[in-house]
Image: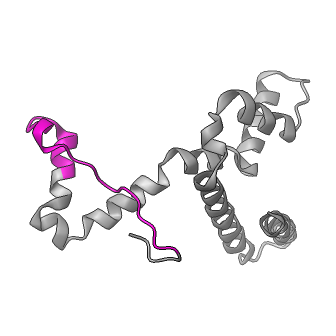
Amino acid sequence: MTFTRPINQSLVLELDLLNLSARSAADLERLYLLCREGIVRALLPEYHLHRQATNRFFLGAILLSDPVIEVVRRELRRLSPGMKVQADEIKGLLIQDVIKREVVEGDEAEDARRKVHRALVRALRTRQTKPEGEDNDAAAALIAEVESELVGE
């Protein structure tokens, strides 16, 4: 349960006790989360964080982030020298043809995109605190750009 306004809940773990297999490693791992040792070690919240970080909305937001699109752009230029592809074109193709629509639209997708932006800003700020001169100016400009995108939404 999430104690926000309004109170919300999300499914963390689902088990079908009638169809569990003692030979299945995945079933045993999920059962371990609910046994005494798993509860004492607080594994369920850790499992929940892992599930949130690897859900389709979060991964879709990461794929559409500026650093990943720049890597894709760089790889396309490396594979096809002389080809000029804009970042907006790559992002549009990913949204229209590669990623399912439900992954990039909706409340969960928006929440995941905000989390990715915040993580990017945090990483850039950490990198900016290193005394490297010109890189700090570039990082500061990138932080300002990402923050303006966040505020503009």
Residue 15, position as x, y percentages in the image: 21, 47
Location of the N terminus (image quadrant) = bottom left
The figure's colour scheme reads one colour
The answer to whether residue 100 is left or right of residue 65 is: left
Whether the magenta-drawn stretch holds residue 14 is answered as: yes
| Range shown magenta | 6-30
Image point (28%, 63%), residue name: 44
The answer to whether residue 137 is left or right of residue 34 is: right
Q: Which residue lies furthest to the left in this view?
A: 22
Residue 85, position as x, y percentages in the image: 88, 31
Image point (75%, 42%), residue name: 69
For the residue pair 5 and 143, the one nearer the viewer reads as: 5
Image point (82%, 21%), residue name: 80
Image point (12%, 61%), residue name: 35
Quadrant of res 46: bottom left
Residue 55, position as x, y percentages in the image: 48, 48
Quadrant of res 81: top right
Q: Which residue lies furthest to the top in this view?
A: 80
Residue 123, position as x, y percentages in the image: 66, 67
Considering only vertical position in the picture, is 77 above or below 109? above
Most common secondary structure along the magenta stretch: loop
Considering only vertical position in the picture, is 91 above or below 82? below
Q: Which residue lies furthest to the front in this view?
A: 6
Considering only vertical position in the picture, is 58 above or below 119? above
Location of the C terminus (image quadrant) = bottom right
Whether the magenta-drawn stretch holds residue 20 is answered as: yes
Considering only vertical position in the picture, is 24 above or below 115? above
